[in-house]
Amino acid sequence: MLTFMFASCNSSQTPNTALSTDNTKVNEDMRSDEVLIEIERKVSDRTYYDNLQEIEEQAELIVRAIVKENLGQEINTSYDTILDKHVPVSGYTKQEIEVTKVYKGDVNIGDKLVLMEEYYLWPKPDGNKRLVTTSFVKPLKKESEYLMFLKYQPDWDVYYRVGDYQGIYPIPTDEIRAKLNDGVLKIEDLNLYDNYGGESLPYLIPFYKEAVEKYPSE
């Protein structure tokens, strides 16, 4: 198990924070791989795992689930004394997911859960949007199904992915299976992950291959 800790610089801010809710929806035409949208990646404390077994042990739920609805976002803001306005400090987006198969955990097929995605949208002065993310996973696509390894966050009443990108995998198509079996599958073939600047994603393809074999979609 590897833990990476990062620090980022902030502008001068008062210590007081306010919680605001922005119900902007991330829909099909706003996905970062389909339109030009400014993306800002922020680093954060992160734990990555050396093998799938570690992820399974950390996960409270292992399920297949379909993304059903974007429930909006929660954003923590702080007043910036230099800019003379509130600016975002952190935030996340909530997605409703529907369980389609249970491999581990006390949930049932058909249950709806709230999944935390580690990104939010913030308006720019020109009216466009900035997608701010601490994740290597793109915003999830509505009605798409994924294999997920999840833990519960009681303070926010949401589930989150174990190890960020290591805790979610797309259900493979026949084409993806063929590439996986031939040993030629690339991360970009999965259309789910983005390194946002060239950082490597350790163990992703081996983990995906093992997960597909261990948790078949049929």
Image (cartoon, grey):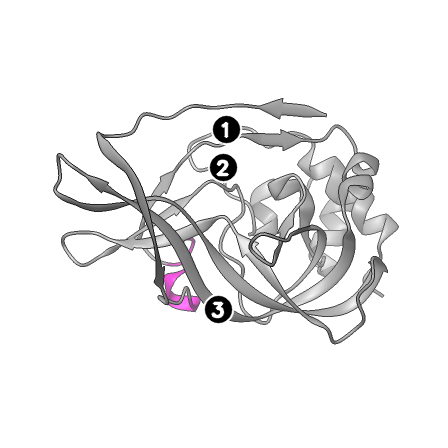
| x then y, percent, for residue 1 | 72, 25
| x then y, percent, for residue 90 | 39, 44
Q: Name the residue carrying label 3.
A: 71
Horizontal side, residue 138 vs residue 186: left or right: left
| Residue type at tag 3 | Leu
Q: Which badge, 3 or 2, comes first in the chain's sequence?
A: 3
> Who is closer to the viewer here, 38 or 109?
109
Q: Are marks 1 and 2 in contact (CB under 8 Å)?
A: yes
Query: Is 217 included in the stretch rendered in magenta?
Result: no
| x then y, percent, for residue 188 | 56, 44
What is the CA distance from the residue labelled 1 to the residue labelled 3?
Answer: 30 Å
What is the CA distance from the residue labelled 3 to the residue labelled 2?
Answer: 25 Å
Question: Could you say which quadrant of the image residue 197 lies in?
Answer: top left
* Crowding at mark 3 (Cα within 10 Å: few <14, some 14-19, many 20+): some
What is the CA distance from the residue labelled 1 to the residue labelled 2?
Answer: 5 Å
What span is colored magenta in the figure? 27-34
Secondary element under disc 1, as helix, strand or loop, is loop
| Residue type at tag 1 | Glu
Q: Residue placed at 20% from the left, 51% from the top?
A: 124
Horizontal side, residue 16 vs residue 83: left or right: right
| Residue type at tag 2 | Asn
Q: Name the residue carrying label 2.
A: 195
* Crowding at mark 2 (Cα within 10 Å: few <14, some 14-19, many 20+): some
Q: Residue placed at 69% from the left, 32% from the top?
A: 203
Horizontal side, residue 107 vs residue 14: left or right: right
Secondary element under disc 3, as helix, strand or loop, is strand
Question: Could you say which quadrant of the image residue 35 lies in?
Answer: bottom left
**How many dots with numbers?**
3
